[in-house]
Image (spheres, rainbow, N blue to C red):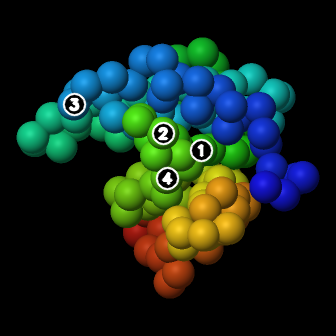
């Protein structure tokens, strides 16, 4: 891992995934950090109709705590799956509401020595040529 990563945020999400993301309903945990340092967390709620992802639950928990200036997000899978990238819907929502947010992702292939290679990337990098929701009304 690179030294500029938010190791505390990763550890918080990993602990939540290890202790609370049990069974088929909760398989992902996420943590977000606000500019002032506060951390909010969330678990996904799996349902065959979709259900909210852990990242969006964490964003809602942050808002409920009055935390709106989010700077970093990470998601960790249950069963020791490690850091996972956000799905397309989460990427779009994060981009629309927090265009400057950094997303911690795994950069390795998942095999060999680079399995744990992590880095923080701007959400815009995860959505090349993105349509911004705010752009619909110029």
Disc number lying in front (3 or 2): 2
| Quarter holding residue 89 | bottom left
Quadrant the N terminus occupies? bottom right
Q: Which label was assigned to residue 84? A: 4
> Measured from the top left, where is residue 73 in percent x and y?
62, 44
Disc number lying in front (1 or 2): 2
**Tag 2 or tag 1, which sits nearer the N-term?**
1
Residue 84 visible: yes
Residue 60 visible: no
Q: Is residue 76 above or below residue 91?
A: above
Q: Is 68 left or right of 2, judged from the image as shown?
A: left
CA separation in Å, label 3 and label 2? 15 Å
Q: Which label was assigned to residue 24? A: 3
**Tag 2 or tag 3, which sits nearer the N-term?**
3
CA separation in Å, label 1 and label 2? 15 Å
Q: Are marks 3 and 2 in contact (CB under 8 Å)?
A: no
Q: Secondary structure at mark 1?
A: strand
> Measured from the top left, where is residue 108 in percent x and y?
61, 69
Disc number lying in front (1 or 3): 3
Camera-side residue of 25 and 88: 25
Q: Which label was assigned to residue 37? A: none
- Judged from this view, the residue extending furthest toward the left is 48
């Amino acid at each position: 891992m690179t030294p500029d990563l938010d190791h505390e945020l990763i550890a918080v999400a990993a602990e939540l995934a290890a202790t609370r993301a049990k069974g088929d309903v909760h398989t992902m945990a996420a943590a977000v950090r606000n500019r002032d340092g506060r951390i909010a967390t969330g678990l996904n709620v799996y349902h065959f109709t979709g259900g909210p992802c852990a990242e969006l639950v964490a964003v809602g928990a942050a808002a409920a705590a009055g935390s709106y200036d989010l700077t970093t997000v990470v998601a960790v899978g249950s069963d020791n799956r490690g850091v996972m990238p956000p799905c397309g819907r989460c990427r779009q929502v994060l981009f629309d509401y927090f265009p400057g947010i950094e997303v911690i992702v795994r950069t390795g292939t998942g095999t060999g020595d680079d399995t744990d290679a992590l880095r923080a990337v701007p959400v815009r990098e995860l959505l090349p040529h993105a349509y911004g929701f705010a752009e619909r009304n110029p």
